[in-house]
Amino acid sequence: TAITFIEDNGTTTELDVPDGWSLMQAATANGIDGILGECGGSCACATCHCYVDELLMRMLPPPQPGELDMLANVAAERRPNSRLACQLKAGPALAGGTVTLPPNQE
Ligand code: FES
């Protein structure tokens, strides 16, 4: 699934994310600096905060209560399109989506 990651400094990387991988896994495995993923994806650190584009807003399932709880703890500004990348699983419906990364994660 083609997903584009835009870091706060403008660096743009398009990745082909295997289905079932989280966007946090894909970003950290490919050296994208704007996502830390300190808890390894268990929705306990909020260092995988990202802003999703309109396509992803439409296609992603809404955040579960655990993700909403952690979104209250993000370091950067929380916006209506804030999500935790470890909770976003790649699949065909997300193809062509873009996530923008905040200036800081902690
Ligand atoms: Fe820790 Fe997403 S990697 S909350």
Image (spheres, rainbow, N blue to C red):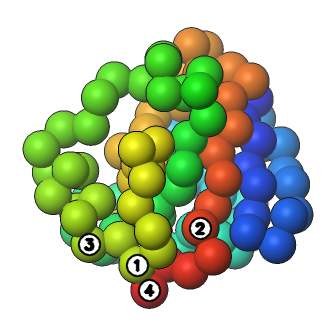
Classify 92 as above or below 101: above
Q: Amino acid at mark 3?
A: Asn
Q: Quick one: label 2, few (<14), some, or many (20+) residues within 10 Å?
A: many
Is the CB of mark 4 within 8 Å of ligand 1?
no
Q: Amino acid at mark 4?
A: Glu
Quadrant where ligand 1 appears: bottom left
**Left or right: where 102 falls relative to 21:** right
Name the residue that disc number 2 marks. 102
Q: CA distance from mark 1 to mark 3?
A: 6 Å
Q: Nearer the viewer, residue 52 or 48?
A: 52
Q: Position of residue 7 (x, y in %)?
A: 75, 64
Q: Is residue 29 visible?
A: no
Badge 3 vs badge 4, beta-carbon distance below 8 Å: no
> Which callout, 3 or 2, points at the residue further toward the start of the chain?
3
Q: Amino acid at mark 1?
A: Ala
Name the residue that disc number 3 marks. 73
Badge 4 vs badge 1, beta-carbon distance below 8 Å: yes
Q: Quadrant of residue 4?
A: top right
Q: Is residue 21 visible?
A: yes
In the drawing, what numbered circle is on residue 75? Answer: 1
Q: Nearer the viewer, residue 77 or 40?
A: 77
- Residue in the image at 63% along x and 76% along y: 103
Q: CA distance from mark 4 to mark 1?
A: 5 Å
Q: Position of residue 21 (x, y in %)?
A: 51, 39
Label 1 sits on a secondary structure element that is loop
Q: Amino acid at mark 2?
A: Pro
Name the residue that disc number 4 marks. 106
Badge 2 vs badge 4, beta-carbon distance below 8 Å: no
Q: CA distance from mark 3 to mark 4?
A: 10 Å
Classify 51 as above or below 76: above
Q: CA distance from mark 3 to mark 2?
A: 14 Å
Q: Quick one: label 4, few (<14), some, or many (20+) residues within 10 Å?
A: few
